Image (spheres, rainbow, N blue to C red):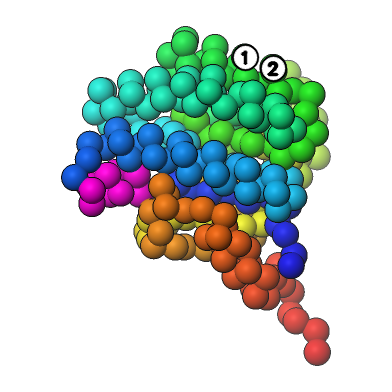
Amino acid sequence: MNIPRHIGIIMDGNGRWAKKRGLPRTAGHRAGTDATRTIVRACGELRISYLTIYTFSTENWKRPRIEVRMLMDLLVEMVQREIDNLHENNVRLRVIGDLSKLPPKTRTALEDGIKRLDGNTGLTLNLAISYGGRAEIVAAARRIAEEAIRNPSILDGLDEKTFGGYLYTKDIPDPELIIRTGGDSRISNFLLWQSAYAELYITDVLWPDFDKAEMVKAIEDFNRRDRRFGKVKES
């Protein structure tokens, strides 16, 4: 089986999972962290090199304040609880997004986790937090413009590869497969530049119910795709 080097996941369905069980949304988010732990472990077992999960979008700041606060606290709890297990499994942690908006406690926990796992060489786990694909592209364009004011000649060599060097993911490959749980068929501002040629896999399975078996289904579906990258298939 051909294993994608980089998989992105839009985790959706925590709230619906809780509602179906007559539970508060917070219970769905906690169940979602259990699913995240399961999938991180599965990716390590499947020898996937990079996993990027859409943890908290720029749009999620518009949610009720109490839910946002709970999600920020849950991030702290998850990192502190899982850090030893991630280290034992040789996982490296990264975060992409506008971290300046995070509460100090959340940002500190993430930075401590990144530092603790920095020397690991297995799966790279990218948490997309306070992340939006459009905002990422705008931020990259702004940095290029600022540099061009000082050195206009950099525009002469500006191409797609150079532009990609200004993105959060500048030193990792683009995702080959993007999975969305919960059944909605949209990209939701996730890795807009990087997903240009990613295969999309939509499943009705809600995120708390997504496990290794479901991950394998997605990879099997990926293996059935005809990836031509705009070229004509040879006879």
**Residue 19 coordinates in the image, percent (x, y):** 22, 47
Quarter location, residue 229: bottom right
> Overall secondary structure of the magenta stretch?
helix
- The x and y percentages for residue 71 are 37, 27
**Image position of 231 with respect to 72: above or below:** below
Magenta-drawn stretch contains 20:
yes
Residue 75 visible? The answer is: yes
The magenta stretch spans residue 226? no
- Going by the picture, which residue comes out furthest to the bottom? 235
Q: Residue at x 67, y 70 (%)?
A: 223
Is residue 55 found left or right of 22 in the rendered image? right
Disc sitting over residue 75 in the figure: none
Q: CA distance from mark 1 to mark 2?
A: 5 Å
Nearest to the observer: residue 5 or residue 81: 81
On the rendered structure, is 132 left or right of 111? left
Q: Number of callouts in the render?
A: 2
Where residue 112 sits in the image (x, y, percent)? 62, 14
| Residue 226 position (above or below residue 148) | below
The boundaries of the magenta stretch are 13-21
Residue behind mark 2: 115
Indicate the amino acid at tag 2: Lys
Residue 165 in view in this figure: no
- Residue lying at 30% horizontally and 36% vertically, measured from the top left: 27
Q: Nearer the viewer, residue 6 or 163?
A: 6
The amino acid beneath tag 1 is Asp
Provide the residue designation for mark 1. 112
User: Foreground residue, 91 or 101?
Assistant: 91
x and y percentages locating residue 209 in the rendered image: 42, 52
User: Do tag 1 and tag 2 residues touch (Cβ < 8 Å)?
Assistant: yes
In the image, what residue occupies the spot 64% across and 36% down?
125
Q: Residues within 10 Å of mark 2 (few under 14, many from 20)?
A: few
